[in-house]
Image (spheres, rainbow, N blue to C red):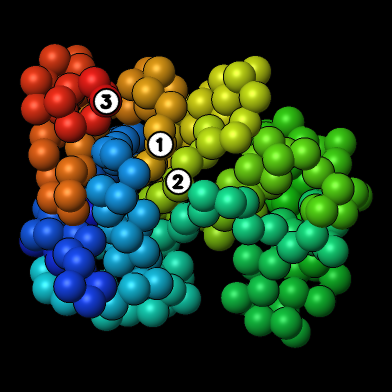
Amino acid sequence: MTLLEVQNLSKRFGGVTAVDACSLSLDLGSITGLIGPNGSGKTTVFNLITGFLAKDAGDVRFKGQSIAGFGPNRIYGLGIGRTFQLARIFPRLTALENMLVPVRRSGFRALVSRGQWNDERSRAMDMLAAMDIASVAGLLGGSLSYGQRKLLELAAVMMAQPQLVLLDEPAGGVNPALIERIGEHIRELNRQGVTFLLVEHNMPFVMGLCQKIVVLHRGAVLAEGTPADVRGNAAVLDAYLGS
């Protein structure tokens, strides 16, 4: 079953075409990598899918419904979460408080009721434990290491129980030991039914994690296929992997 379809998506900034008739699809339950050189349009595609930018042409369909033109909050409410290149957390809130921010969509009055608060707090602690960062629950977000912030951001996204998560450089700036842990957490969430699309420059990480790779070059899809297909593609080697 196809969960997300991007159809001939285009975006221009002045005279520069950042995304040029880009098309890709994600199967339900898959992990797909979106790779390409700097400036190839990867983050712009993420911003178009999640409503942070308005398209110039094309369409984005989630579970068969067009979501092009929807704002980020509406898209988030449909079940699409995302992380960012630089982890976006609230530095003056504790890790646990960061976890509870996404569930405020249920309404402040419901959240502050004792039963609702206890349920959400328990679920937040379970998710922190699943990410191996329960020990920092009471620490301010600003005091965490960069890798812990990455894990906290992913954990907070999962509080909204999304079906699809877009990860923007989950391994970027993270030490090798923690990169391996992040990969295992993504695999475990995927086993639980979460579909992932990730942008990543760490080739061993993305090749070992993803079932399908889509390669962007100058805003357009240059190639797609299994990691083995992409590794052996001469055009990809010339445009990116061999550079």
Q: Earlier in the sequence, mark 2 or mark 1?
A: 2
Q: Earlier in the sequence, mark 1 or mark 3?
A: 1
Is disc 1 surrounded by few (<14), some (14 to 19) or many (20+) residues within 10 Å?
Answer: many
- Between marks 3 and 2, how big is the CA–CA gap? 24 Å
Residue at the spot 17% in from the left edge and 64% down from the top edge: 17
Report the front residue among 40 and 44. Answer: 40
The answer to whether residue 64 shows anywhere in this view is no
Q: Secondary structure at mark 1?
A: loop
Q: Secondary structure at mark 3?
A: loop
Residue at the spot 66% in from the left edge and 81% down from the top edge: 107
Mark 2: which amino acid?
Answer: Leu
- Indicate whether 168 appears above or below 209: below
In which quarter of the view is residue 201 placed? top left
- Between marks 1 and 3, how big is the CA–CA gap? 16 Å
Quadrant, the C terminus: top left
Q: Which label number is shown at residue 167? A: 2
Report the front residue among 192 and 21. Answer: 21
Work out which residue is located at the far right of the displayed protein and give it: 138
Q: Is residue 2 left or right of residue 94?
A: left
Quadrant, the N terminus: top left
Q: Answer yes or no: do the residues labelled 2 and 1 have beta carbons within 8 Å?
A: yes
Disc 1 versus disc 3: nearer the observer: 3
Residue at the spot 77% in from the left edge and 39% down from the top edge: 145
The residue at which mark 3 appears reads as 243
The residue at which mark 1 appears reads as 200
- Between marks 2 and 1, how big is the CA–CA gap? 8 Å
Position of residue 93 measured from the top left corner of the image (x, y, whole percent): 83, 62
